[in-house]
Image (cartoon, grey):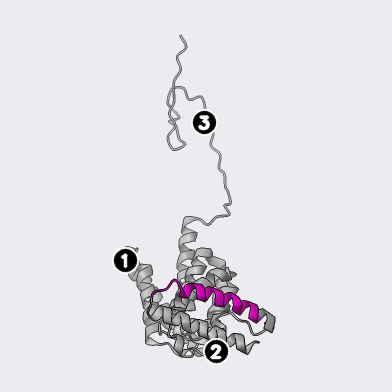
Amino acid sequence: MDKRVVQSIQYGFIDEKSPGVFGVKRLNLSWDFDEKGYEEAAEHREKAGVLTLKLGVMVAMADGNLDETEGNKLKEWIIKNIAPFEEQRKSELKSLFNDVLKSGFDGAKAGTLTITSIVNELNEVADKNAKYEAVELCFDVMAADGVADQAEIKAIRDIATKLGLDMDKINAMRDQRIVALDASATTNSSVESMLGISLDWDNDQVKKHLRKEFSKWNNRLNTLNPGPERDNAQRMLDSIAELRKKYG
């Protein structure tokens, strides 16, 4: 009678002294993965968080001042991003981000911190989702005081462009904030910036873009309930109409 011993293998290992084992050979192998390892990914997420906060500070300081509402929005971001962690780690990250907030403010004020340098670092460590989250914080900071500042809008577009993001998605983020802003406080020049009109465009490019924006905001107006957001959408339409006159 043929008696066979069935040897179980657990987690890739067997008992070398068990019956039925004729030989065991070990090989040492190394493998390079294109994907980030767990520790590297965690390190990069933390680094991306630091850089995201710095970009938020840069947008807040684009007009030369850090408004209290903008500062509060940055603090809200810190609280939200440390919330999932255990108390010790939460305390470490809170200390780290608070230091980044202070040093970022000092660097932006002194002119030693630049958007380009921050974005270059972010491109090295962040995936697409992290990059969009960074721009989202920038838009939240821009909208915090309820006013669309031209310098802040320009800074965000510069960031998104340097990060290589889809501008249609960026414009969708922008539009969500615009309806909550004090549109009556905008000027034609800031509306041009909000709409993504580039200074090097010719009149035909501008007019084509304005027709697209007018159609979009007109459709949005019809979906909004009466109230501040609908009023802002109407003001955007009025401003676009004025720009269409300006560009012929």
Query: Along the polypeptide, which appears first: circle 1 or circle 3?
Result: 3
Residue 171 vs residue 218, the one in the foreground:
218
Residue 83 vs residue 153, the one in the foreground:
153
The secondary structure that most of the magenta stretch takes on is helix
Label 1: few (<14), some (14–19) or many (≥20) C-alpha neighbours in 10 Å = few
239 w.r.t. 44: above or below: below
Q: Label 2: which residue?
A: 188
Marks 1/3 in contact by CB < 8 Å: the verdict is: no
Whether 182 is among the magenta residues is no
Q: Position of residue 142 (x, y in %)?
A: 46, 81
Query: Along the polypeptide, which appears first: circle 2 or circle 3?
Result: 3
Drawn side of residue 218 relative to residue 102, left or right: right
> Can see residue 53?
no
State the separation of the CA atoms marked 1 and 3: 45 Å
Q: Is mark 2 on a helix, strand or loop?
A: helix
Marks 2/3 in contact by CB < 8 Å: the verdict is: no
Q: Label 3: which residue?
A: 24
- Examine the image and state in which quarter residue 215 appears: bottom right
Q: Count of labels shown? A: 3
Mark sitting on residue 88: 1
What residue span does the magenta drawing correspond to? 206-225
Labels 2, 1: front one: 2
Drawn side of residue 93 relative to residue 134, left or right: left
90 w.r.t. 200: above or below: above
Residue 177 vs residue 97, the one in the foreground:
177
Quadrant where the C terminus lies? bottom right
State the separation of the CA atoms marked 2 and 3: 78 Å
The amino acid marked with disc number 2 is Asn
Label 3: few (<14), some (14–19) or many (≥20) C-alpha neighbours in 10 Å = few
Q: Where is residue 244 in the image (x, y as percent from the top left)?
A: 60, 85
